[in-house]
Amino acid sequence: MSHRPSPPGFWAALRFWAWLGCVSFGGPAGQIALMHAELVERRRWISERRFLHALNYCMLLPGPEAQQLATYLGWLMHRTAGGIAAGLLFVLPSLVLLIGLSWLYMAHGQHPLVAGLFDGLKPAVLALVIQAAQRLGQRVLDRPLHWLIAGAALLAVGGLNLPFPLVVAAAALAGHLLGRAPAAAAPAAPAPAAATAWLDDDSPPPAHARFSRRRLLTVLLAGGVLWGLSWGALQLWAAPVVAQMAGFFTRAALVTFGGAYAVLPYVFQGAVAQQHWLSAAQMMDGLALGETTPGPLIMVVAFVGFAGGWNHAALGPAALAAGGLAGALVATWFTFLPSFVFILAGGPLIESTQRMPRLAAALSAVTAAAVGVILSLALLFAAQVLWPGGMFRPGAALLAAAATLALLRWRVGVLPLLAVCGGLGIATRLLA
């Protein structure tokens, strides 16, 4: 058996989280796989079982599971400062890139090359949404009740246009009353010569990871104060459109069970259909931009905030970019603040609590509902991509079908797919 690695210093961990934030393409699955390869296999900072235990908790939470996992592991290794640093660095590169790309899109989106790029990216995004529904469905639709819940969620959101939080609450209640907890997956048996990790299976929890009611209340109070002060300041001094974003994106952060694709219909309902912060076409283009940047896909909320601040001239017609920046920062802050509170408050409890069967039964039903919600998103996007303005676009349909086949059959990576589709869109525009 290998010797136990030396404890990683805070600055060594900080460099790792900064690097991870810059290279974490490929969605949650790719980001979690990269963290596992680096932290468990190569650096041996944490054991396989501890990694999976942290992942299971993050999968139960609303919010971006990969970002929450980074926050949890950073907290486990280096206390609250390590968790905050890991979580921030996981999203910061994506935020900077998206703000720059959002400005480019809003200021120069009508240029033929930019328009052609999005012509090609939109069918690829539709294919990615279909792939997300297929992957999640394979994992969670393991019993008739879950199939029924997924179908009901598709009808409720896609057909009846019911509010997303209502669908989540109904699914959780159905799972609690009618379902049972999914069988706990046994941890993978270690190989005979498994390498010892710094935080190994037999390592006692660090002092800061031991549950304390006082610490729990302190974290909850600090999170509530931060939210309340920032929300109150916006209500007093910010433009109305930016102030409205605070409450909206907080609600969005609390109903994102099933990942970013599952919450996008809720964002679409609120930001496009109700608040009119941006158009449906702009929402599609923003999702395409989100797919091309590292970090969690839910960072598309930064684009939504930027577009809302720009379109409504939040800081005046002479400062459109500044208004967009304000919207992007507000959307990001209120989307991710709950995730930090969930991890820093709940981490010690999870370190001491191995099973939550009633909670798991309810949340497995919510995840099943997320499959139906994602399918409703696919139908919504299909209408925007294939029938814009009521006119069918056979070229877009052919490209979407080819992209879907490439993802599901040939396992093509996300970045190569986006590059090819974007190039085809530009070429089509230039040749038209």
Image: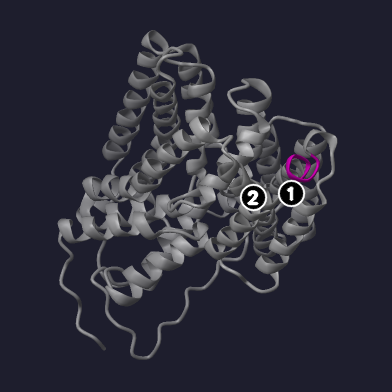
Magenta range is 382-387
x then y, percent, for residue 227: 37, 25
Is 242 in front, or is 29? 242
**Is 430 left or right of 246, judged from the image as shown?**
right
- Please give the name of the residue rendered at 69% of the width and 62% of the height, measured from the top-left corner: 403
User: Local crowd at mark 1 within 10 Å, few (<14), some, or many (≥20)?
Assistant: many
In terms of secondary structure, where does tag 2 sit? helix
From this view, report whether residue 275 is shown above or below residue 417: above
Q: Nearer the viewer, residue 6 or 117?
A: 117
Residue 385 on image: x %, y %:
73, 44
Quarter of the image for residue 405 reads bottom right
x and y percentages locating residue 1 in the rendered image: 26, 89
How far apart in space, not on screen, are marks 1 and 2 (Cα)? 33 Å
Q: Which mark is residue 430?
A: 2
Q: Is residue 348 left or right of residue 404?
A: left
Circle 1: element type = helix
Identity of the residue drawn at 44% across and 55% down: 66
Amino acid at dot 2:
Leu
- Residue 283 against residue 320 in the figure, above or below: below
| Residue 144 within the magenta-colored segment of the rendering | no
Which residue appears at 51% of the width and 36% of the height? 105
Kindly identify which residue carries mark 1: 375
For residue 63, the mark is none
Residue found at the far bottom of this picture: 192
Q: Considering only order in the chain, which callout, 2 or 1, is on the residue closer to the N terminus?
A: 1
Tag nearer the camera, 1 or 2 = 2
Q: How many numbered circles are shown?
A: 2
Q: Is residue 225 visible?
A: yes
